[in-house]
């Protein structure tokens, strides 16, 4: 736990993400933390967020958080993120307007709103990829998304990237 202001906690989070330090990242989440990418995904609870951390580390995720404002326990920022999945799809860098809620030195919630270009690009890729996966690789798709929603963990990051490369090769 980081004692201090929201900016201190968010900076520690950014540094840990870029260092791929799962222990520190996960220590910064409150037990009931929530993470949402608006209209794309929502994750609740520390165990699910630990899976997302492992997923992101496996894909070598890097992010830059540019704070815009801090009001009480909320920090608003512009976030740029990249990883192997985004690079493989041709998106490269995803951009978001985000709000971090911090309490007692821990992240309670992150709400990320993709900028229109990012939202459209991710939507196109996900729709096409999921349709292909359900048809061409239903067994693997069932592992990635057993209930129609992706299960975030390191194994699924690797499996999803392998499938994404296959999907891309068949499209090109």
Image (cartoon, grey):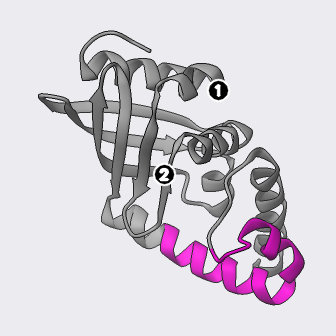
From the viewer's side, name the closer residue of 29 and 41.
Answer: 29
* Residue 156, above or below 30: below
At 57% from the left and 19% from the top, the residue drawn is 24
- Judging depth in this view, the residue of 17 and 105 nearest the camera is 105
On residue 46, the disc is: none
In the rendered image, the quadrant that contains the C terminus is bottom right
Q: Which residue is mark 2?
A: 44
Going by the image, does 169 lie left or right of 109? Answer: right
Q: Is residue 146 left or right of residue 32?
A: right
- Does residue 21 appear in this view? no
Q: Is residue 20 shown above or below 34?
A: above
Please name the residue shown 67% across and 53% down the image: 152
Q: Main secondary structure of the magenta part?
A: helix
- Mark 2 and mark 1 in contact (Cβ < 8 Å)? no
Q: Which residue lies at the image location 56% right of the left edge and 28% below the top edge?
A: 26
Provide the residue designation for mark 1: 22
Spatial separation of the CA atoms under disc 1 and disc 2: 17 Å
Relative placement, left or right, of 107 versus 15 is left
| Horizontal and vertical percent position of residue 73 | 19, 29
Placement of 36 over or under 51, stated as above or below: below
Range of magenta residues: 122-148
Q: Nearer the viewer, mark 1 or mark 2?
A: 2
Q: Is residue 144 magenta?
A: yes
Does the magenta portion include 84?
A: no
Q: Position of residue 148 (x, y in %)?
A: 64, 77
Q: Residue at x 36, y 37 (%)?
A: 108
The image quarter containing residue 67 is top left
Q: Quadrant of residue 25?
A: top right
């Amino acid at each position: 736990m980081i004692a201090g202001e929201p900016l201190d906690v968010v900076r520690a989070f950014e540094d840990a993400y870029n260092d791929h330090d799962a222990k520190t990242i996960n220590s910064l989440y409150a037990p009931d933390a929530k993470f949402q990418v608006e209209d794309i995904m929502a994750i609740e609870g520390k165990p699910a967020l630990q899976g997302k951390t492992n997923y992101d580390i496996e894909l070598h995720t890097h992010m830059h958080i540019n704070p815009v404002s801090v009001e009480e326990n909320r920090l608003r920022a512009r976030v740029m993120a990249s990883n192997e999945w985004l690079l493989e799809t041709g998106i490269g860098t995803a951009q978001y307007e985000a709000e971090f809620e911090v309490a007692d030195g821990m992240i309670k919630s992150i709400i990320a709103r993709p900028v229109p270009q990012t939202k459209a690009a991710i939507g196109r890729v996900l729709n096409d990829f999921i349709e292909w996966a359900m048809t061409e690789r239903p067994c693997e798709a069932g592992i990635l998304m057993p209930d129609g929603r992706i299960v975030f963990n390191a194994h699924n990051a690797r499996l999803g990237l392998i499938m994404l490369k296959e999907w891309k090769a068949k499209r090109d």
